[in-house]
Amino acid sequence: MTPGARVAAAISVLDAVRAGEAAEKALTGWARGARYAGSKDRAAVRDHVFDVLRRWRSCAALGGGDDGRHLMIGAMRSEGIDPHTVFTGDGHAPTALTEPERAGGHVPVGLDALDLPDWLWPHFETSLGASAEGAAEMLRHRAPVMLRVNLRRGTVADAQAQLASEGIDTTTADIAKSALQAISGERKIAGSVAYAEGLVELQDGSSQAAMEALQITKGARVLDYCAGGGGKVLALAARADAAWYAHDIAPQRMNDLPARAKRAGVEVTRLETGAIARAEPFDLVLCDAPCSGSGTWRRSPEAKWRLTPERLEDLTQIQYEILARTAPRVSDGGCLAYATCSVFKQENEAVVARFLQEHPSWRLGQQRTWPISGAGDGFCLAQLVRG
Ligand SMILES: C[S@@+](CC[C@H](N)C(=O)[O-])C[C@H]1O[C@@H](n2cnc3c(N)ncnc32)[C@H](O)[C@@H]1O
């Protein structure tokens, strides 16, 4: 596909997203109808769409409108490309710019420039103070591709050498002992031997750092209560020999966990909700709770625009209930770890404060937050203990 044809495809996908379709679904729908598109074309169209999703408001301002066509005009301008060179009407490229389109658009200011919905700015300011603008700016750009080295399978140096032999260059990242940042060959990772043999996993740096911050004693019983795909329990299991359990309210989310655990050389027992009582107590219960994901909106930018005040409020209630429900599963002297990938105090400190207020036999051990950075997403970890 020509650059213009890729932009035309991105325009159609963005129009579908604007009409309410999920971006992934819209991309899949486009790809199904575009058998001529190769993997590089699909990746390029996806990049266009996700770049705009991160910078919807500023692209709309620069392009002079917020339909797919104007958004892509704005996206071109934001990258210093004259849209006139791509919107040619040749072949499958979008039709040439009209005179109003040539003259339209303006430099974004305020929340257009920060690419945030109006209602969210107070949450950024209250939660992040002087760092709020910097965090919003980080969310406008692509996330780093971070790998976790499975130290059961080899050293960080072993992993770097293996990856390099497969055309994937990496650099170590201070954020966590096991962290590597891919600097080239990112698209080869999922098909690499290093990945297939469990030497590396894709995992954000802050998540790795947070899991490294949790103490695990040999033989401990550990429950990952909101396990999803199991990334957190696998990070923990790489560090110590313990009895690992995983649970999720939507058990199908854990479908890939057995294969991932096998690759990693660990055993994780999946538990249905009704089976938890028979396996308790646990020395550590990790609640990597559902959240707004505001610390990860570089990766899932659509969520930035789809979140509503009502949903945010609902999430804080769910988060509190998860803590209240899991606290009795923790052994005396054990730890209840509450984690979110949100930067909002409302989902972090406020939920912990409510839990402590309503559960006076518990206290806050440690709490740490990781900012949205060059090596990691925004993340928060609170360790709650009895007494
Ligand atoms: C942030 S994700 C977990 C990500 C996962 N720990 C990982 O590292 O890939 C939150 C998970 O919590 C699950 N969840 C939502 N509500 C829950 C509840 N009430 N009890 C248990 N799990 C819940 C969701 O299905 C989702 O998989």
Image: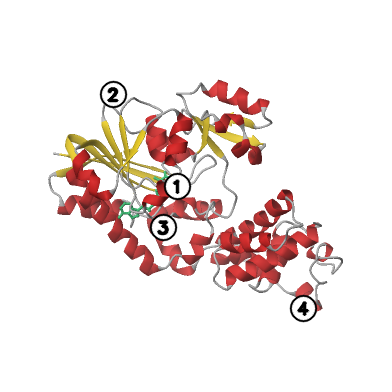
Q: Quickly name the residue at label 2.
A: 218
Crowd class of label 4 (few under 14; some 14 to 19; many from 20; radius 10 Å): few
Q: Which of the two labelled residues, at mark 1 and mark 3, occupies the earlier sequence position?
A: 3
Q: Which of the two labelled residues, at mark 3 and mark 4, occupies the earlier sequence position?
A: 4
User: What amino acid is labelled 2 in the image?
Assistant: Lys
Q: Which tag is nearer the camera, tag 2 or tag 1?
A: 2
Q: Which tag is nearer the camera, tag 4 or tag 2?
A: 2
Q: Which of the two labelled residues, at mark 4 and mark 2, occupies the earlier sequence position?
A: 4
Kindly indicate whether the residue at mark 3 contacts the one at mark 1 (C-beta within 8 angstroms): no
Q: Is there any visible trace of residue 236 in the rendered image?
A: yes
Question: Could you tell me which residue is drawn at 57 percent across and 41 percent down?
Answer: 145
Q: Which of the two labelled residues, at mark 1 and mark 4, occupies the earlier sequence position?
A: 4
User: What amino acid is labelled 1 in the image?
Assistant: Gly
Crowd class of label 1 (few under 14; some 14 to 19; many from 20; radius 10 Å): many
Q: Quadrant of residue 93?
A: bottom right
Q: Secondary structure at mark 1?
A: loop
Q: Which mark is residue 231?
A: none
Crowd class of label 3 (few under 14; some 14 to 19; many from 20; radius 10 Å): many
Kindly indicate whether the residue at mark 4 contacts the one at mark 3 (C-beta within 8 angstroms): no
Q: Which tag is nearer the camera, tag 1 or tag 3?
A: 3
Q: Quickly name the residue at label 4.
A: 100
CA–CA distance between discs 3 and 4? Answer: 38 Å
CA–CA distance between discs 2 and 3? Answer: 34 Å
Q: Which tag is nearer the camera, tag 2 or tag 3?
A: 2
Q: Quickly name the residue at label 1.
A: 378
Horizontal side of residue 374 vs 72, given as left or right: left
